[in-house]
Image (tube, helix red, strand yellow):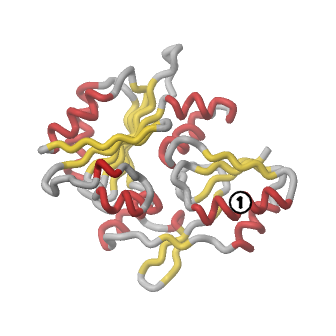
Amino acid sequence: MKILVDDSVDVEGIEKIPLYIDWKGRKIRVSDIDRPSYFALNKKSVISLPTYDEISRIISGHIPVTVLLPSRSFSFLKDELNFLSSLSEGITLIEEKMDSVALALFLNSGKPLSEDKKFAQRATTYLLFSDLSFLRKNDVISEKKESVILTKMINVVKLGFGRTMVKSMWSLKSAVSMVIEDIKGTPSMIAFRYSGKKKIVDSIVKEFSARFHSNISIDWMNPVLASLYGHDTLTITVILEDNNGQNN
């Protein structure tokens, strides 16, 4: 069966449903954007979604097809895919309980789709440098108790399998230490995705490399994720070894 994802998932060899960025008066497909230039010149992302006809044309050309959506996907895209699946047999829509980075790591691991839930349980993403009001506006977090946060503190947001946590630290060093201490188990992969602050990212990666002997992945953030989390932010996605001690 054919597998499709959307442009928020950075994986090669799998066809994607297009997502677009409105930038400089043009609609540019996310997968075509040169990210170093984009993040150097732009401080916000405005996502433009595909039309219903565009989605329908891509889906109908691959039936039977399974569409994997990352957590916190766009409601319009999800609604249209649900509508299409109600009209035609052979369309399976799976809403994964992991973000775009974790989903990409899962697909790149070569594991069968039947292991997606187990993989999601081993995946946790931490956000650094995000503005909480921005995250709340984008439904990344919703807890009322997190409404009062001192602006000079560094917020650490933990996203994982059915859980969200926000803690605030007075320094970057304490924020990084909090993330490292929160990791319970042995990571097989730690993936860093950034939309700015490259020098700071390098120093954070150094701290993790000194503590964990795991695979490290460093790359630019997907512009779709930057639209959800904010620019000049960092995500740290941790994949723990499974119970058998196997990687990824």
In front of the other: 136 or 117: 136
Dot 1: within a 10 Å radius of its alpha carbon, few (fewer than 14), some, or many (20 or more) residues? Answer: many
Question: How far across and how far down the image is residue 166, in percent?
Answer: 30, 43
Q: Is residue 106 left or right of residue 139?
A: right
Question: How far across and how far down the image is residue 17, in percent?
Answer: 65, 61
The quadrant holding residue 209 is: top left
Q: Residue at x 27, y 30 (%)?
A: 180
In front of the other: 221 or 139: 139
In front of the other: 100 or 164: 164
Question: How far across and how far down the image is residue 20, in percent?
Answer: 54, 71
Q: Residue furthest bottom?
A: 25
**198 to 102, vertically: above or below:** below
**233 to 56, vertically: above or below:** above
Q: Residue furthest front?
A: 144
Name the residue beneath numbered marker 1: 81
Q: Residue furthest right?
A: 89
Q: Amino acid at mark 1?
A: Leu
Of the 4 image quadrants, the one containing the N terminus is top right
How many numbered discs sit on the rendered protein?
1
Q: Residue at x 69, y 51 (%)?
A: 67
Q: Is residue 73 left or right of residue 130?
A: right
**221 to 99, vertically: above or below:** below
Q: Residue at x 44, y 57 (%)?
A: 139
In front of the other: 164 or 193: 164
Q: Residue at x 50, y 41 (%)?
A: 102
**171 to 56, vertically: above or below:** above
Question: How far across and how far down the image is residue 176, in percent?
Answer: 22, 38
* Secondary structure beneath label 1: helix
